[in-house]
Image (tube, rainbow, N blue to C red):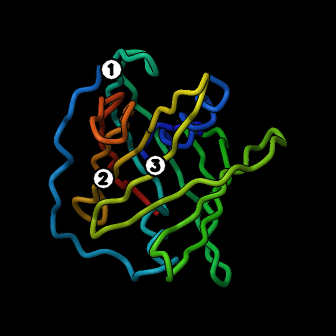
Amino acid sequence: MCRFASSFVLGMTALFALESVTAQAPQPPPKVAVQQPTAGIDAIMAYAGTWKVHGTRFATPYSVAGEEDSTLRNECWKSGEYVACRQIVNGESKVLLVFTYSDLLKMYTSYPIPQNGEAATAGRLQIVGNVWTFPWEVTQGGATTYFRVVNVFTGTDHIDYAQEFSPDNVHWTRMATGSETKVGN
């Protein structure tokens, strides 16, 4: 996933990187009552616009310590029951994300389409209130490692995020944390 500067992108960036590649248990971010967009596929439109991103990465087996400041632009549009978002980081187009939604499963599927012609993969997104979780897993040498990006909307123009991994899908270690502030449409 070319986890761009934001939590939304960071998760996708990490997924792409990890596919080619003792936990702590931090508390999940607090839930804040925030009015969310309409349910279903329309909810994805909350990501549309330009976001200033600031994040801190931690040294883990899957991440290198450092700071990150970026500008993320999500050019999103809806067509029927699909939402597509072209993600541009610091002026450079990174990926096209196509989202679908299953009302039966209450789950979104995302298809990050890289611009280099590689095949699209499928990811998941679960939205519960103002908490959006992008989970995935990687199995190598018979061992599965679980990953997730957790976005907490604390307003229509602010997201706090954490990128985490776990060997057991229970105890999570933070790889990165940060925030995104919407600065334009």
Q: How far across and down, in percent of the image, does residue 69 sit?
A: 40, 31
Q: Residue at x 34, y 47 (%)?
A: 180
Assess whether mark 1 and mark 2 are in contact (beta carbons under 8 angstroms): no
Report if the CB atoms under discs 3 and 1 are less than 8 Å apart.
no
- State the residue lying farthest toward the front: 142
Which amino acid type corresponds to the residue marked 1 in the rendered image? Answer: Phe
Q: Residue at x 49, y 63 (%)?
A: 48
Which residue, given by chain and number where applicable, does mark 2 sit on? 159
- Note whether residue 153 is visible: yes
Residue 82 image offset from top left, x and y in percent: 64, 75
Q: Earlier in the sequence, mark 2 or mark 1?
A: 1
Q: Residues within 10 Å of mark 2 (few under 14, many from 20)?
A: many
- Three-letter amino acid code of the residue under disc 3: Pro
Q: For residue 64, which quarter of the picture?
A: top left
Disc number at residue 99? none
Displayed quadrant of residue 86: bottom right
- Identity of the residue drawn at 20% across and 34% down: 25
Residue depth check, mark 3 versus mark 2: number of the one nearer the observer: 3
Q: Which mark is residue 135?
A: 3
Q: CA distance from mark 2 to mark 1?
A: 19 Å
Q: Residue at x 22, y 59 (%)?
A: 154
Residue named by callout 1: 58
Residue 90 visible to the viewer:
no
